[in-house]
Image: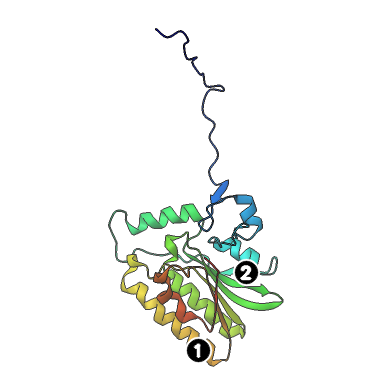
Amino acid sequence: MAIFKKPAIKQVGGKKRDIPRGLFQKCPGCSEVVPETELAQNQRVCPRCDYHFAQPAKERIQNLLDPDTFVETDADLKSVDVLRFTGMATYKDRLKKYQGSTGLLDAVISGYGILDGYKVAIAVMDFGFLAATMGSVVGEKITRTIEYGTAQRCAVVIIAASGGARMYEGMLSLMQMAKTSGALAQHAQERLRTFLFSQTRQRPESWPATLHWATSLLLSPRA
């Protein structure tokens, strides 16, 4: 028979306190836990190891262009389920899901603004929306951005984060590469520049959809 009894440990404070989600991010580069506020202040670059996190399109535009100079164009374009794609979830359901989680209608924001004093046409992809796959709307908005840059005789800046062609749109998705390439060829004939910044260098599937856009290519280090 035991002489001493193990005292019962009672939990103080009732329910377990939950930590709100989204306050911290674990860095894939160094495995350190970094506060979200610190990442936002450092343009989503890990202060410990310089790993570059994916940056939402709206945040990228805000950090890249001169303050209060961005004007969005074609903001009302929406993808349509022409092929009536079905699977684990329908294409319509997936679009609604990502529109709700990102606040975007599709995977790219396009428009024009001022960059260090120079007017530019700009298209910024958001990997958070269906991995920034290129469907009809993405291709159309990028094409219109390039055509605007040609008409205004200004440089075109494309921030690419594409996961490739959007399978839910089949051949219509693949046709976007030809359309954007044609607009770029005309832009290049006018001796105007196109700058492509890619933050998906470790995703090889993104290269066929984005590499053909650039006359100048910039890569996000360790992204």
Q: Residue at x 60, y 50 (%)?
A: 36
Separation of residues labelled 2 and 1 (CA atoms): 24 Å
Q: Label for residue 178?
A: none
Q: Which residue is mark 2?
A: 71
Pinpoint residue 71: horizontal percent, then vertical percent.
Answer: 62, 69
The answer to which of marks 2 and 1 sits earlier in the sequence is: 2
Instruction: Tell me: 170 left or right of 7.
Output: left
Badge 2 marks a residue whose secondary structure is strand
Above or below residue 51? Residue 1 is above
Quadrant position of the N terminus in the picture: top left
Pinpoint residue 192: horizontal percent, then vertical percent.
Answer: 58, 87
Above or below residue 199? Residue 156 is below
In front of the other: label 2 or label 1? 1
Q: Residue at x 41, y 65 (%)?
A: 79
Q: Label for residue 186?
A: 1
Badge 1 marks a residue whose secondary structure is helix
Q: Residues within 10 Å of mark 1 (few under 14, many from 20)?
A: some
For this rendering, which residue is in front, 182 or 216?
216
Q: Quadrant of residue 66?
A: bottom right
For this rendering, which residue is in front, 12 or 69?
12
Above or below residue 155? Residue 198 is above
The amino acid pointed to by label 1 is Gln
The amino acid pointed to by label 2 is Val
Pinpoint residue 95: horizontal percent, then vertical percent.
Answer: 40, 58
Q: Quadrant of residue 217?
A: bottom right
Point out the residue furthest to the left here: 87
Q: Residues within 10 Å of mark 2 (few under 14, many from 20)?
A: few
Q: Are marks 2 and 1 in contact (CB under 8 Å)?
A: no
